[in-house]
Image: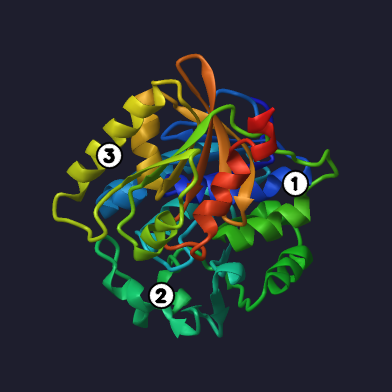
Amino acid sequence: MNTISVAIIADDLSSAADAAAPFLPKGLTARVGRKLVPLEPSDVVAVDVGSRSMPEPDAASAVRVATAALNRAQIVFKTVDSTLRGHAKAEISAAFEASGRSRLIFAPAFPAAGRVTVNGIQYVDSTPVHLSHYRKDPVNPVSTSRLSDLLPANATQAIVFDAQSQEDLNRQVREFSEPETALWVGSPGLALALAARIGRPGRRVSMSRASGQCLVVVGSANPVSHRQAAKLNSNATVVLKAPEKRLANHDRVLSDLADKAVVALRSGRFGALLATGGDTMDAILDRIGAPSFKLCGEFAPGCPVGQAEIDGRTLLIGMKAGGFGDEDTLRQAVDTLTPRKQDQAS
């Protein structure tokens, strides 16, 4: 295996892609693997182990296996959700044990999205995360905002980075000596800071546009995504949506939605796919048989774009977390991924 500059172990697909994307403008190549380490060479390799939806013991085991497979990378980065959802403590402990690193840096702040860390407490839009609406998350309710509660006992050299701005993160990462000796744990904010620290000059990243229409699949029940979808009225867009209220049979709803999406994609009409929620994109990629994909940019900070293969042709894929962005985010994403009006007219 070629030397990997950065190895990323993530608990879902959105986290894997979000963490890898900031390295692209810094001259590094990036690829995302689904459950397995990609075979194709790349400077940055991100693996989605799918642990967000697993029972905690299985989640820890999956993280341990993936980290052990990638621990020879120069930098090892374990993602956590900036709102602390998921099996954070168990996964951090498993990653630290398997990484072979002597130090642990915990920095889940993502200031661009309103998630900051003050005195070791994680805030979402000025509210401690365990008092925000994330405490009622239907899958991964958050019970603490204190980052020290999530640190493993075996990490005797653990440091928590407070950060209220991206520059706070950038400065602390820039000043940290011997970064290869630490397991880095954080969200896209930390990825941005690491990319600024280790990136190398490279050509400017320019994303190609799709050759056909854009299919938008809203698998999230988050009301933000549904408001965004309501703003889509372009003739270049078809929207498939899950119900606005998460139902008890959500898995079945998501499966049916993915089936409909694949039927549409195989028609050849669409050159781009935009999905809200990593599990939505994951279900669709399962069905088209894409074990990994190349990252090629972002349509907005924290909203990655990649290239997957379907039926021998390239499909541009974009992802957005359910609650991310303002009401124009999906519309702007479609405008970024699809041909300009003057291109369509020519």
Which callout, 2 or 1, points at the residue further toward the start of the chain?
Answer: 1
Q: Residue 323 is drawn in which quadrant?
A: bottom left
Q: Secondary structure at mark 3?
A: helix
- Asked if 65 appears above or below 244 in the picture, the reply is above
Q: Nearer the viewer, residue 87 or 283?
A: 283
From the top left corner, tell me how far across and down residue 105 is, in percent. Answer: 59, 64
- Quadrant in which the N terminus appears: top right
**In front here: 270 or 181?**
270
How many angstroms separate mark 1 from mark 3 (CA)? 33 Å
Instruction: Name the N-terminal-most of marks 1 and 3.
Output: 1
Nearer to the camera, 226 or 59: 226
Query: Which of the two residues, 332 or 107, is positioned nearer the viewer here?
Result: 332
Residue highlighted by disc 1? 25
Is the image coloured rainbow, by chain, by secondary structure, or in one colour? rainbow
Q: Amino acid at mark 2?
A: Asp
Determine the residue positioned at 58% across, 58% down.
188
Helix, strand or loop at label 2? It is helix
